[in-house]
Amino acid sequence: MVRMARAEPTGDPVICRRVIASALSLAATSGTLLFVCLCAAAAPLAQAFFEPTAAGAVAAGLAVTLLVLLGVMELVANPGLGAAGLLRGRKDTRVPMLYTLAGYWCVGAPLGLWLSEVLHLGIAGVWTGLTVGTLVTTCLMLARLAGANQHPQSQPASQGQE
């Protein structure tokens, strides 16, 4: 965000593109690392926390599912969070806030409830819904950033024009 806020006033599209590329690369890399670590550690962690009984095996299986879903959520969330920070650096905050509300509350929460209650997926359904909401939010943020990058000199649409 700070690098974008400093690069934007220069009006140099090359600098802005470098800031965007580095921020999104770092976000994608960290999301990928978190995903790999959570997936690799899911089963050993779950087995360490639950007793080797039938109930413990069921709980461990659910824990593995939730840890993998958390990994997927990190994988898809990090580029969107990076894009949101870059947009904040451009002083574009209102529309990204609406995207976040729409992604989580209009898509993620209702889908999670539906998967949980109607399809009887339980907590895994809630987390799946939230993961899809996160994916929607990330796609919207990246699309906004790409659109803003097409016209770096123009004022963000979320700010009032006089």
Image (tube, grey):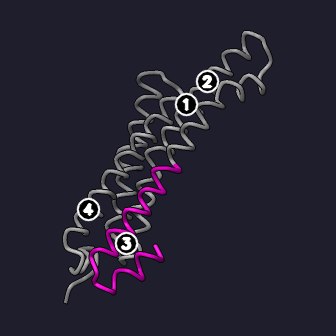
Disc 4: CA contacts within 10 A as few (<14), some (14-19) or many (>=20)? some
Q: Helix, strand, or loop for circle 2?
A: helix
Marks 1,2: beta carbons within 8 A? yes
Nearer the viewer's eye, disc 1 or disc 2?
2
* Distance CA(mark 1)–CA(mark 4): 34 Å
Q: Which label's residue is closer to the chain start, 1 or 4?
A: 1
Q: Residue at x 41, y 24 (%)?
A: 118
Per the rendering, the mark at residue 123 is 1
Q: Helix, strand, or loop for circle 1?
A: helix
Q: Residue at x 34, y 47 (%)?
A: 136
Q: Is residue 126 above or below residue 105?
A: above
In the displayed orientation, state which residue is furthest to the top: 54
Highlighted magenta segment, given as a residue range: 1-30
- The residue beneath circle 3 is 93
- The residue beneath circle 4 is 146
Q: Is residue 155 above or below residue 56?
A: below
Q: Residue at x 46, y 41 (%)?
A: 130
Q: Which label's residue is closer to the chain start, 4 or 3?
A: 3
Q: Helix, strand, or loop for circle 3?
A: loop
Amino acid under disc 1: Ile
Disc 3: CA contacts within 10 A as few (<14), some (14-19) or many (>=20)? some
Considering depth in this image, is 35 or 122 the residue closer to the camera?
35
Q: Which label's residue is closer to the chain start, 2 or 4?
A: 2
Q: Which label's residue is closer to the chain start, 3 or 2?
A: 2
Q: Is residue 139 above or below residue 73?
A: below
Secondary structure character of the magenta stretch overall:
helix
* Distance CA(mark 4)–CA(mark 3): 15 Å
- The residue beneath circle 2 is 62
Q: Does residue 145 appear left or right of residue 33 in this picture?
A: left
* Distance CA(mark 3)–CA(mark 2): 37 Å
